[in-house]
Image (cartoon, helix red, strand yellow):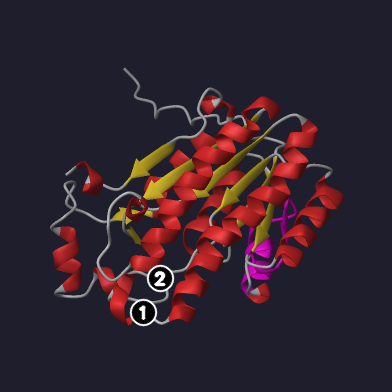
Amino acid sequence: MTSTSPPEIGYGLGGKTVWVTGASRGLGSRVAAALVHHGAKVAVTARGADALDRLAEELGDSVVALPGSVSSAEDVNGVVDRIVERFGTLDVLINNAGISPTYLKAADLPEQAWRETIDTNLTGAFLCAQSAGRVMTGNGGGVIVNISSMYGRVGGDRLVAYAASKGGLEALTRTLALEWAPYGVRVNAVAPGYLRTDLTNGLLDHERHGAELLERVPLNRFGETADVVPSILHLASPLSGYTTGATLVVDGGWTAQ
């Protein structure tokens, strides 16, 4: 009997126009690459133009790099206008842009660090969803996938601003899902646990801190971006057509405890 590998999942994203924020590295760049692989036309946004240009060149003609800050309404609206001008529409938004710049106790956190985190992770996601949602509701449908975190549902020591921003993002997800369901727009979230990226490897490989974190993961390993991308594509696709207002947790079991 000849063994064959399982068929590749078809997400039904061919020809769709997808906007990925925070796409210059890490999870965002992997999501953009997967979308191109599945036939989508992709607009990528981040603050660093050089990294975006390199990504667009690597992924090919179906990708357009549109640098800007998600915390600026002017930048966000300009990006959406350019997406519609280039591709004619906007079908899917992957709200991936996010930061976690500090690791301090709440009592020691500077106000500016709090505001910077909230502005990017929560206000930025709202501005992108608001601008994209105007297009989607006018078109009679669309999908938004917000990238949250397991810290949106459990506390995180020394992560007060990050956890607050992600908890707010999940509340935003549910509220937009209710408001825009009558217009055919679905809004969901994915909440990853610790993933290995260039930004997290130092922490996860730390002799003490990394070991302490790993002890809390029932599956006994940290995640890879490849563990999360399929969940994002699933929620972005027609395969999840009856799902809205939900958060899919991909954390190795951390929040099950």
User: How many discs appear?
Assistant: 2
Q: Earlier in the sequence, mark 1 or mark 2?
A: 1
**Image-based side of 227 in relation to 185, left or right:** left
Residues drawn in magenta: 51-70
Tag shown at residue 198? 2
Q: What SS does tag 1 mark?
A: loop
**Residue 178 pos. (x, y %):** 57, 32
Residue that numbered label 1 is attached to = 109
SS assignment at label 2: loop
- Which residue is more in the foreground, 115 or 151? 115
Please tell me whether mark 1 or mark 2 is closer to you in this view: 1
Above or below — where is 14 with respect to 60?
above
Cα–Cα span, label 1 and label 2 = 24 Å
Q: Is residue 2 left or right of residue 9?
A: left
Q: Residue at x 84, y 43 (%)?
A: 88
Indicate whether residue 64 is drawn in magenta.
yes
Q: Is residue 2 above or below residue 57?
A: above
- Residue 164, quarter of picture: bottom left
Q: Give percent across and percent down for residue 140.
A: 75, 29
Residue 75 visible here: yes
| Kind of residue sitting beneath label 1 | Leu
Q: Quadrant of the C terminus?
A: top left
Q: Amino acid at mark 2?
A: Asp
Return the mark for residue 213: none
Image point 58% across, 49% down: which residue? 94
Location of residue 158 by image quarter: bottom left
